[in-house]
Amino acid sequence: MKTKIFYISTLLATTLTFGSCNNSKANTLVNNETIIETTTIKRTTENKIQVAILLDTSNSMDGLIEQAKSRLWNIVNTLTTLKYQGKAPEIEIGLYEYGNDGLSSEANYIRQVAPLTTDLDLISEKLFSLRTNGGSEYCGAVIQDAVTKLTWKDGNKNMKLVYIAGNEPFNQGSINYKEVIKEALKKEIYVNTIFCGNKQEGISTLWQDGAITGNGKYFNIDSNQRVQYINTPYDDQITQYNQKINETYVSYGRRGADKKRNQAMQDANAESVSKANYVERSVSKSKTVYKNDSWDLVDKINEDEKALETIKKEELPAELKDKNKTEIKAYIAQKSAEREKIQKEISTLAKKRQEYIDNEMKKQKTQDDLGNAIATSIIELGKNKGYSVEK
């Protein structure tokens, strides 16, 4: 039997119509040929949204780290609502820590935890590994490092954002924050500040001035406040689909098996924070922002249908080692179809879930936390940059 496979790429925040859609066919037999047909929707790589998160990990910031763990997937899902001229941009997130006495004094007590990357499981893994200790918080130094050492993409279509959170005076250290932030603006990198404490104290300790200098937003949060969640009637079903979608990932390469285990570990990390956080992560998996072409054959072949030509037999998982190329392609196509169907189900439920949350939030007063501060400013700054919001 000859197999024809049409691979799938979905828009961020947009799922493929599958199964019940009149324009879609799956596993249809035509003249003894298995044809898997789907609507191809391309994610643009012409522009990016790049977000660097700079977290104070000194002794007093345990609450801030917990908020970051609690809000990572909510931030990701907010990013996926942004479109530029109707196209979904590629999204990269980077992570820094600063103000930790366990870090090198020669490096101003700062560390690049993760570069700007599309590997969201890596960001989650590194975030959950952070520990507080000490220290001396040099905002100018960590902003300078992020601006000069991360790989930022040039061009007016791209949105480049830095978020720095902490609670000590913004002007500590030998590096002048004003000069650093002005250099960032020359690269169209907008610096936003989140002070962990009283609003007026943040103003008097120059956190607001940092945001004004960087054409960004200033927020103050209570970093010790527990994140407020709204449970919904759709949560259980979404998490059930998350378990099913994990079964569609097919690891390959030297680190493929480890990466697949890490995927399950980051599920567990999200769930350890709260059920709502686990649901947010599950929703992220329904969108192409969550892509793993470096270790998952389904994503890899969706990106490059000739990828199997360069992958060695020993790099394949056990379930594929005894199959020929035609059989492997059919297997991957089936997993791709299964994933797209699950993504559609999650997306439908996620929209109902968000409507429920929006209605509940109107009934209660919510305070800014790290995630809310970042999410609301992303939307506002995105609109200023020419992006539209499409939920």
Image (tube, rainbow, N blue to C red):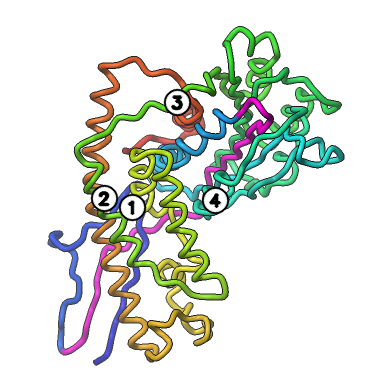
Residue position marked by numbered label 2 in the rendering: 346
Q: Which residue is mark 1?
A: 286
Amino acid at circle 3:
Arg
Q: Is residue 60 magenta?
A: yes
> Residue 118: image x %, image y %?
53, 53
- Tag nearer the camera, 2 or 3: 3
Residue at left 37%, top 62%?
Answer: 9
Mark 2 or 4, which is nearer the eye? 4
Cα distance between the residues tagged 2 and 3: 27 Å
Name the residue type under label 1. Ser
Where are the magenta residues, as a range?
A: 32-61
Q: Quadrant of the N terminus?
A: bottom left
Q: Residues within 10 Å of mark 4 (few under 14, many from 20)?
A: some
Residue 94 drawn at (x, y percent): 60, 45
Q: Which mark is first along the chain, 1 or 4?
A: 4
Task: Give me the residue at 42% from left, 55% from top.
Answer: 43
Provide the residue designation for mark 3. 226
- Disc 4 designates what residue? 125
Q: Earlier in the sequence, mark 2 or mark 3?
A: 3
Mark closer to the chain start, 1 or 3 = 3
- Circle nearer the viewer, 3 or 4: 3
Which tag is nearer the camera, tag 1 or tag 3? Answer: 3
Left/right placement of residue 248 relative to residue 252 reads: left
